[in-house]
Amino acid sequence: MEEILLHIGEIILIIGLVVFGILGSILPVLPGVWVVYAGMLVQHFFRDGIEYHWAILVGFGLVTLVVQLLDYFIPIWGSKKLGAGKYGQWGSMIGVFVGAFLFPPFGIIVGPFLGAIIGELISGKSGEKALKAGTGAFLGFITGVFMKSFLAIVMGGWLIFKLFV
């Protein structure tokens, strides 16, 4: 009986980490893909019968790191793609950090957008061009959310599959 309860507890923990990680990929204030990756490590090191090859652990770890880093830089690239100059790019980057730390959870959504707009206005560009740069930063943010969510769902599906197979 004790073994069955332990197994059920492990299943609840892993599924909880997956759900929390997927939500965190969408909601800016929660950690996302790192939580799902932590679930993979928990499965590997603490669950009898589930072991991952070192290449899987390292591979998913590296992909998680790259996706997390890209999530900070894609809004900057998005603003650049829609015409932002150096001031708009810097504004977008500053907006990511200021928004994340001063106005969580929505600051990380609005921060790059407003930062790009403010940067472009400071550089002397028109309001229309500044708004276009801010839109690029916002679209970059949305791209990051989709990227993180996709990875969290793939890793989460893998973890749940391993639980029952």
Image (tube, grey):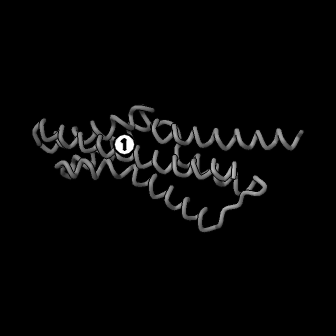
The answer to which of 145 and 120 lies nearer the viewer is: 145
Specify the quadrant that holds the N terminus: top right
Q: Which amino acid does label 1 sit on?
A: Val
Measuring from the top left, give residue 15's x and y in whole percent: 64, 41
- In this picture, is 51 found above or below 112? below
Residue drawn 81% across and 42% down?
6
Q: Position of residue 157 (x, y in %)?
A: 57, 48
The structure residue drawn at horizontal position 53% and vertical position 48%, both measured from the top left corner, is: 33
Q: Mark 1 points at which residue?
A: 96
Residue at coordinates 33% horizontally, 41% vertically from top-left?
95
The number of discs equals 1
Left or right relative to 31: residue 81: left
Q: Quadrant of the rendered structure where residue 131 is?
A: top left
Position of 149 compared to 162: left or right?
Answer: left
Q: Which residue lies furthest to the front in this view?
A: 165
Q: Is residue 120 left or right of residue 10?
A: left
Residue 46 x, y percent position in the rendering:
76, 53
Q: Position of residue 126 (x, y in %)?
A: 10, 39
Closer-to-camera residue (89/70): 70
